[in-house]
């Protein structure tokens, strides 16, 4: 028996029983046919209802102590875990992502909720900063981070769990103390509803204010645009295409009261590969590269879509092996018909470009949903002439740029767009070249990797999943790892308040045992000042 | 003998000898006549030169160690100190701010440079975060903050030193490792040139790359707009009017590559005054309020332009005393003719509003440059009806809103715009009311103050000089205090790099002795992991 049923309705506060006019269906890329459920597009008044709920909920939710917010998050873990298999099955139908991959993504999703539970129970994330000097006659100034307000979340097509309804954006916002309204991704709206139901049940069980979470359906743009325009919304999190992200960004900037948009829009994640490394690791490198390139049918933000190598005879061997690897690579259907169509169109265009030649093209190609793996090459000179070669082609496509020497490789970095990641492949003794590469790359990419592929993003406090525009709309924040909570926090400072009026985080006695910056020392100690 | 002379020329890199076509003169509000110097408006090619210099300088400057950047900042202190009096005299001529006030501002400016010297010598500001677990098979991930790129700085009219050429914006950007191009404020372009010359000399002496600092003159908008549009510029800092800040914000959002704009646009800094406090501190409160209101002719971002009180007989006494205090208050000329004209126009409009009555109006009024101190009152009911009563009137004007009870005072907060500060005046035993006020106010203001006026912003690590829109364009950052450096930093993350390729801040041995977050513990210890 299924724990939750898919009704196709939006969830607003604790309610599912709401009126809707228009509906849509999901075309399963796995079954190549429409799934039976009708999904109802949220009406204008339903969106308003969710907004007003969120606005009202914020007044209460922002003051709820971390311990209770942690209970809520833990309960989300429990409720999702209870119908884990049902969610994975549905996601498989809706996205064609392999079951095993979805199981991994489910574990990651639950682990990342746990990470935020631990973060807010620890409590140090509020960056408590105290300047209170007993000896001097200065003011007593204390500062901490507090929640920014209701957040609109736009889930990603390519991660139906970890970057969607209960993904990093939603959970980091809820952890921060911000209500969330999710604009459910229409391609996996059923998965979305199951997860949203679990969140809603968890909220009800832990007595969170109604409206702390809502999930709205739409197959078009109306709901999303209305959310970003709404005065009740104070920040936007988005994972998806450049076009989609920039549209929301522009709306947010042109509001009467502008709000931040944290849009992660993907990149081509260049690899810089030095000859000796390839020569010494020919087969392993080629295998890992193709595995990374074809992972999830190439539909990763961190997909290695661009590789720089240096001219030499060894390249022939590399290209031969790549060609074999591409034939052997596991392929599967892309997420949606639209994505598959876009990919094949962009591919056609890419292959017709001047001085661009195919190296490896997969021959398996079972349906119009499936992605053809394609690796092409060009010269460094040509790459510098044609800026369009930098553009992401969402899918298992990669361009290898053959530079005439190391200097050309270095010079090219000056004209590269912002990236989520950049990887360098080099032998131990090539320290000088690596230093030169990393120095330059640190200005254009969020994460620098040595001798490893960019796919696979560890969820931890030191992760930076972000990068200069156009990889994201805001290079100063990450959307993965505990620091992603910072997107939904703002500082507030208290001057000369007596201890009893201060939040617990800033009182003299550090009851919460959090790390605080006290007169420029990080400490968990109490503060010794006269009352 | 003067150390530096005013040439009226922009400073581009180390050069002053440049061609300019158009010029402008400064009308001294103190002397009520034009000063003799011609200031030359930077040409398009001069702006381009400064931009290219900054872009090139960044490549070198971003890699220069903190110790050398600290030398540069220390040398700025020395060079400014050497012609301190000359700068203060000139600023007095250009702004009409009293000498004593300018001496205080000069001290603050130098102290705040020293604060950033100490910050970068300490080094912990890079937020080094390390996840490296010897026992587990996970990736080695290490993250820190690095400079964002060249910054355009727009100084404030009301702080010719502390928020201008060598003010907090410039110094925090230089401390972060970002070259700076200042668009000099045309009202105090002479002061600007003297300070810019000192910075330039300091850069030359400490062998900083040419273009780490430039100072461009313009009496209009061309230079500023061109800077914000330029691809070389990666962030903008602005202190000034709402109109000016929003214009730059819009330009920055509509660039091909959007960049952050940190605009501090001021606010009305509401005071919430409970009856018992006023009764017990009648004279002292009135005196402090009028002193704060008239400080610098009311031209402070944190000027108390709005006060909420609760109906009662005691108010008559308060208003009488306020009237006397306003008569006795020290007045002086406003910063510019334009500001003085704007103020008198807005004042006229404010006094003609429905249900708004004058309480205290200064009678001294010596010239068209001088600001009339005006305190008016209205009812809570009327305030709620007319949103325009919330708008800042830049100058010594304040509106007292008489609420019918505490609940009305609380309710009004829901409709207040974002503020830099909010102050509560209450007696010790009124804890419950204070809690209610602070809880609500923490969502709408950046700094909450008990029993003190908002003017006077302590420069320290716990300060937050910021707040929700429209007080600033970005509620997540401060423009005063050491955290203001965060505006000009972005994270970068390193995965699996060997120790010798990592920046010093992230190596196993913590040579720099900085605080680091190592596996979620703040510590200065070395890291024990196998190489």
Image: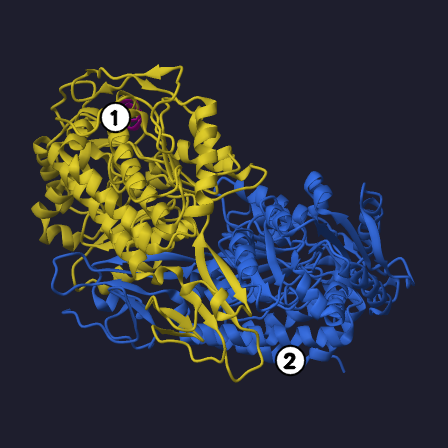
Chain colours: A yellow, B blue
**In the drawing, what numbered circle is on residue B81?**
2
Task: Tell me which corner region of the image, top left, top right, bottom left or bottom right, holds residue B277.
Answer: bottom right
Above or below, B421 relative to A331: below
Instruction: In this rendered view, identify the residue nearer to me: B197 or B475.
Output: B475
- Residue topped by disc 1: A190
Give the number of callouts: 2
State left or right for residue B61 relative to residue B274: left
Above or below, A21 relative to B105: above
Would you say residue A348 sits in the magenta stretch?
yes
User: Is residue B485 at least partly visible in the picture?
Assistant: yes
Spatial separation of the CA atoms under disc 1 and disc 2: 68 Å
Q: Which quadrant of the rendered structure holds the C terminus of chain B?
A: bottom left
Extreme-bottom residue of the structure: A135
Would you say residue A381 sits in the magenta stretch?
no
Q: Give the mark toward the camera: 1 or 2.
A: 1
Residue A344: x %, y % from top left: 26, 23
Q: Secondary structure at mark 2?
A: helix
Q: Magenta segment, which residues?
A: A344-350
Residue at mark 1 shares a chain with residue at mark 2 = no
What chain does badge 2 belong to? B
């Amino acid at each position: 028996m299924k724990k939750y049923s898919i009704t196709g309705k939006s969830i607003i506060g604790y309610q599912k029983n709401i009126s809707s006019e228009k509906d849509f269906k999901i075309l399963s890329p796995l079954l190549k046919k429409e799934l039976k459920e009708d999904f109802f597009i949220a009406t204008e008044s339903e969106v308003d209802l969710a907004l007003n709920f969120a606005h009202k909920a914020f007044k209460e939710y922002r003051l709820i102590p971390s311990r209770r917010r942690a209970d809520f998050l833990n309960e989300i873990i429990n409720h999702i875990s209870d119908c884990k298999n049902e969610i994975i099955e549905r996601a498989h139908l809706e996205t064609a992502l392999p079951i095993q991959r979805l199981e991994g993504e489910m574990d990651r999703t639950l682990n990342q909720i746990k990470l935020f539970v631990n973060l807010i129970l620890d409590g140090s994330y509020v960056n408590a900063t105290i300047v209170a000097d007993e000896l001097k006659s200065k003011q007593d100034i204390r500062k901490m981070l507090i929640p920014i307000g209701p957040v609109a979340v736009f889930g990603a097509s390519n991660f139906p769990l970890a970057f969607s309804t209960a993904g990093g954006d939603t959970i980091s916002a809820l952890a921060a103390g911000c209500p969330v309204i999710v604009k459910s991704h229409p391609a996996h709206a059923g998965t979305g509803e199951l997860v949203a139901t679990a969140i809603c049940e968890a909220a009800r069980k832990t007595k969170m204010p109604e409206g702390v979470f809502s999930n709205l359906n739409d197959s078009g743009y109306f709901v999303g645009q209305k959310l970003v325009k709404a005065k009740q919304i104070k920040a936007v999190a988005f994972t998806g295409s450049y076009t989609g992200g920039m549209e929301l960004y522009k709306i947010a900037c042109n509001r009467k009261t502008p709000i931040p948009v944290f849009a992660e829009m993907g990149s081509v994640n260049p690899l810089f590969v030095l000859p000796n490394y390839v020569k010494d690791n020919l087969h392993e490198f080629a295998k890992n590269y193709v595995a990374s390139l074809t992972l999830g049918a190439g539909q990763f933000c961190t997909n290695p879509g661009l590789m720089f190598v240096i001219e030499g005879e060894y390249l022939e061997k590399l290209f031969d092996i790549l060609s074999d690897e591409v034939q052997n690579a596991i392929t599967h259907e892309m997420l949606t018909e639209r994505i598959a169509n876009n990919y094949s169109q962009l591919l056609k265009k890419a292959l017709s470009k001047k001085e661009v030649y195919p190296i490896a093209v997969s021959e398996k190609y079972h349906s119009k949903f499936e992605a053809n793996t394609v690796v092409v090459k060009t010269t460094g000179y040509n790459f510098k002439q044609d800026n369009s070669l930098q553009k992401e082609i969402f899918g298992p496509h990669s361009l290898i740029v053959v530079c005439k020497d190391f200097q050309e490789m270095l010079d090219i970095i000056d004209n590269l767009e912002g990236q989520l990641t950049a990887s360098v492949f080099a032998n131990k003794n090539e320290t000088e070249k690596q230093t030169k590469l990393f120095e330059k790359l640190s200005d254009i990419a969020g994460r620098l990797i040595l001798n490893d592929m960019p796919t696979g993003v560890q969820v931890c406090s030191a992760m930076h999943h972000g990068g200069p525009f156009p990889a994201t709309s805001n290079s100063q924040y990450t959307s993965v790892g505990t620091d992603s909570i910072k997107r939904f926090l703002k500082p507030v400072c208290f001057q000369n308040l007596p201890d009893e009026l201060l939040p617990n985080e800033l009182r003299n006695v550090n009851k919460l045992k959090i790390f605080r910056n006290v007169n420029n020392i990080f400490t968990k100690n109490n503060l010794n000042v006269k009352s």
